[in-house]
Image (spheres, rainbow, N blue to C red):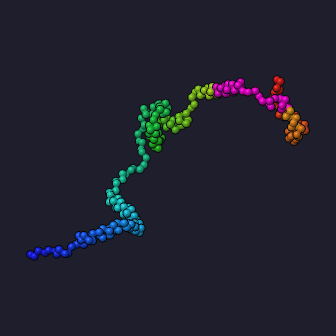
Amino acid sequence: MTDFHLPENNVDEQSSPGRQPARAAQLDHISTLPPPRPNPIVTSLTMLRTPTSNVLRNAVVRAARPAPSTPVVALGCRAASTAISNPTLANIEKRWEGMPMQEQADLWMALRDRMKESWTELTVQEKKAAYWIAFGPHGPRSLPPPDEGKKVALYTFLGIGLSFVIFATMRMFAKPAPYTMTKEYQEQTNEFLKAQNSDPLTGISSEGYSGKGHVQSPSANA
């Protein structure tokens, strides 16, 4: 086998020392060029394709999943074939207000289911409890306390008395009445209005007028 040797004068252009500066200058010129602008059409297609592929992938995954088993719910009302025990309904008039709301709802639902059947099968306790829960004096129909009227009257008189005390105290420390609030000044006001023929039809300047006019205060000498 003959050995193959490259000739010494066949040297690559990059290894030539004379051409290296020119190659470096060309690379510097390329590096200073601005980056190419992205194609808007390609970008739009890429943005549209990505959500679409995600939607299709999710649809395929959901279709491949096994459907959850839906429990079969029996339709119809709960049948209460047995009567409610008497201890549960004993003293319901006194215990109803203190029972939790959940227990009240459960008891009423049980009575309602019992009333859907023949009423001849209801016990006396069930009839009394159903009537009292539906129409008894509880909740909005609660009776007022026995002493509510006395409390209302007492608080009313206390409020009136307190307001009178406040009014009298303010009058004690108030300034004297102005000079216009005297009988003499108000009589002069009537004379002035008559001279001006004020309100000649039915007022102070009318014929046969017998009213007081503006006189409403006691005399300053009183």
Q: Is residue 33 above or below residue 177?
A: below
- Is residue 107 among what the camera can see? no
Q: Horizontal and vertical percent for residue 79? A: 42, 44
Q: Is residue 179 magenta?
A: yes
Q: Is residue 152 magenta?
A: no
Q: Which image quadrant for residue 148?
A: top right
Q: Which image quadrant for residue 213?
A: top right
Q: Which image quadrant for residue 161?
A: top right
Question: Quick check: 126 left or right of 1?
Answer: right
Q: Horizontal and vertical percent for residue 97? A: 49, 33
Query: Which residue is pictured at 52% across the width and 38% down the height?
Result: 134
Q: Is residue 195 above or below residue 179?
A: below
Magenta stretch? 158-187
Query: Which residue is pictured at 85% across the width and 32% down the height?
Result: 187
Instruction: Pick the quarter of the image with the C terminus.
Output: top right
Q: Horizontal and vertical percent for residue 42? A: 39, 68
Q: Horizontal and vertical percent for residue 38? A: 39, 67
Q: Which residue, as the protein is rendered here, is positioned at the far right?
A: 207
Query: Which residue is pictured at 24% across the width and 71% down the height?
Result: 16
Q: Main secondary structure of the magenta part?
A: helix
Query: Which residue is pictured at 86% across the width and 33% down the height?
Result: 188
Instruction: Pick the quarter of the image with the N terminus.
Output: bottom left
Q: Which residue, as the protein is rendered here, is positioned at the far left?
A: 1
